[in-house]
Image (tube, rainbow, N blue to C red):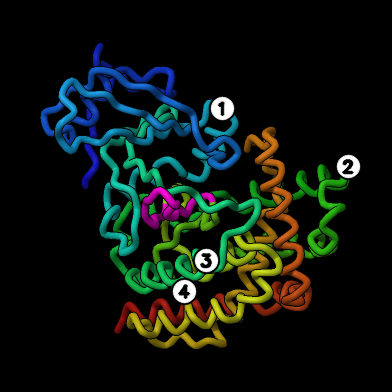
Amino acid sequence: MTLDHVTVGTENNALPLTADELTADWLQFAMADVLAGETIEEFSAEIIGVGEGFMGQLARVTLGYADDSNDAPKSVIAKFASTRQDTREMARDRNLYRREIGFYRDIGQSAGVPVPACYYSEFMEDSNYFVMILEDLAPGIPSDQVTGTDRKTSREVIEQFAILHAKWWNSDKLEDYGWTKWVIKETPIEAALELFEESMKQAEATGKFDAYPEMKRLMPFLPPLFKLDPAPPFPFTLTHGDLRSDNIIQASPAGGRFAIIDWQLAGIGDPINDIARWLVQSISIEDRRDTEQELLKLYHDRLLEYGVKHYSYRKLINDYKTNLIVVLLMFSMSMDSIDQSSDRAKALFHQFYARLDSALVDWEIEKPLKALPYIYPFIKVGLLLKKAFRKRT
């Protein structure tokens, strides 16, 4: 379903900025195309996703109708910008809210993988507030990232992302959308280096990474990477950008279906970044060690099956190691603008760090990390030449 874009500001359809500002009149207005003539008589909103969705506010909105006999949604998910100004500023810097709205407007149900329907969206560029009304996937439930996703669901994720990546593999169409810019290029190198250096000082003062010795040991090797001015990825595809358990909906005993949510980091990217993020964030250390090679081979086999050419398994493994460095760099940055105050958020970030720490050891990332500043200029030339040659042919 395509998104509706409306004029904001009339008395009955003033854009709500939080769940508390929702009204029956506004919901009636925003969902007119999917209500099939039904009238919303009452509603209730419950905040959900505390300690899971860090960049905004989510609410489950239960709807009551004057005549409850048609197929109008019984509940929807309302998604808003963060109530924290520093988080909204971080989202603006990386264009996160516009990315998700753009994804549902331009791609959505045609992504090639299951995603929720979007019934309405609106973005206020001046203030960086937004609101979206999305399909409620209950009784499906998010996979539990703290305990780790089960092996069956993990395999399903790999299967689905092979479909997504293969469909958009080196697709020129992605470059036509205004929101798909490679997210690494959203932040100037100088600003990123300044943030990293401040994060290093903070970590040293607080002992933040003392419990994660490999991360702490490798972080001093990261500063030279900021001088590399990375080339856009090649091969590239449509990537999710935040592939982790909390963004995967799976069926529960009561029903539901598999779906992928939260597309705020979607855009052009390295396909293996999604896969690395999944394997080192969303499954237990034991499950990763037991299934990692199998899942990487499954992903590669499916890419070839779905038509991807000239991408060897050896290349995939090299890209996987490089993306472990990218994940290390990301988690070495300060994330103070993300609310980590809930017990669930604290447990989640511990798992992020602990699982990454073990993967860095298992893959002996020190060697490629030390070599990367010296070999990347040659890799960069190769990437640029491959992309240029593809366009000429």
Amino acid type, mark 4 = Phe
For mark 2, give the secondary structure.
helix
- How many angstroms separate mark 1 from mark 2 (CA)? 26 Å
Residues shaded magenta: 246-260
List the residue tagged with mark 2: 205
List the residue tagged with mark 1: 85
List the residue tagged with mark 3: 154
List the residue tagged with mark 4: 234
- How many angstroms separate mark 4 from mark 2 (CA)? 39 Å
Figure check: 160 above or below 349:
below
Q: Nearer the viewer, residue 104 or 386?
A: 104
Amino acid type, mark 2 = Ala
| Membership of 247 in magenta stretch | yes
Neighbour class for label 3 at 10 Å: few (<14), some, many (≥20)?
many
Label 1 vs 4, first from the N-terminus: 1
Amino acid type, mark 3 = Ser
Mark sitting on residue 135: none
Name the side, left or right, on which 304 lies relative to 232.
Answer: left
- How many angstroms separate mark 1 from mark 4 (CA)? 35 Å
Figure check: 206 above or below 280:
above
Q: Are marks 3 and 1 in contact (CB under 8 Å)?
A: no
Label 3 vs 1, first from the N-terminus: 1
Residue 205 sits in which quadrant? top right
